[in-house]
Every structure is written in C-alpha cells, then in structure tokens.
Amino acid sequence: GCYFARDALYSHNYALPDRNGIRRMFLARVLIGNTTQGNSTMRVAPPGYDTTGDGQSIFVTYHDSQAYAEYLISYR
C-alpha cells in the first residue's frame, strides 16, 4: 500500500535529499474511509475497511483512486 502521514515532519524523515540537497514531498488529498489497525504483512485492507494505519496520523491506502497528489513540494 501507499503510506500517508498527517504531519509533514514525519514524512520529511523519508524524503531523502538529491545530490543538490533538494527534498521533495507530495501534498495529497486522501480518501481514508473506514480505517483499522494495520501491520506490515497486510497486502489489502480487511473486508469492511478502506485503509489501515494507526488511526490517528498514519494511513495506508490500497487503491490508486484513494489519493490525489495535489502539489509536489521541493525544499531544502
């Protein structure tokens, strides 16, 4: 699945800089729907759920249509 974080600071730790020191991150609209606790072995959300995650700040989607990358942010 695709991981999304509510807080940009969390995602910043995964946005490695390129050789010019530029990091990139998407600001996305994500359809969360019904969510349940997830784990690293899941390949799809359980029946009756649309996403998995911690239920507060991290969400995992399993279908491309659940997210729209609205902005690509480049920063140092």
Image (tube, rainbow, N blue to C red):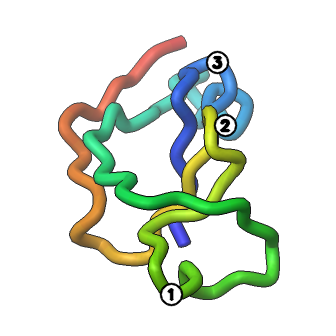
Q: Nearer the viewer, mark 2 or mark 3?
A: 3
| 47 or 51, nearer to the observer | 47
The x and y percentages for residue 33 are: 36, 57
Q: Amino acid at mark 3?
A: Leu
Q: Is residue 72 above or below residue 42?
A: above
First of labels 1, 3 by sequence position: 3
Q: Amino acid at mark 2?
A: Leu
Q: Which dot marks residue 47?
A: 1
Give the residue drawn at x 72%, y 60%. 37
Mark 3 lies on a secondary structure that is: helix
| 5 or 12, nearer to the observer | 5
Q: Which residue is mark 3?
A: 9
The C terminus sits in image quarter: top right
Q: Which dot marks residue 16?
A: 2
Q: Nearer the viewer, mark 1 or mark 3?
A: 1
First of labels 1, 2 by sequence position: 2
Q: Amino acid at mark 1?
A: Pro
The x and y percentages for residue 56 are: 62, 35
Q: Is residue 36 above or below residue 8?
A: below
Specify whether 66 is left or right of 6: left
Give the residue drawn at x 46%, y 15%. 75
The x and y percentages for residue 70 are: 19, 38
Whole-angstrom CA distance, mark 1 to mark 2, is: 35 Å
Give the residue drawn at x 80%, y 72%. 40
Give the residue drawn at x 72%, y 66%. 38
Callout 2 environment at 10 Å: few (<14), some (14 to 19), or many (20+)?
few
Mark 2 lies on a secondary structure that is: loop
Mark 1 lies on a secondary structure that is: loop
Whole-angstrom CA distance, mark 1 to mark 3, is: 32 Å
- Disc 1 vs disc 2: Cβ atoms closer than 8 Å? no
Callout 1 environment at 10 Å: few (<14), some (14 to 19), or many (20+)?
few
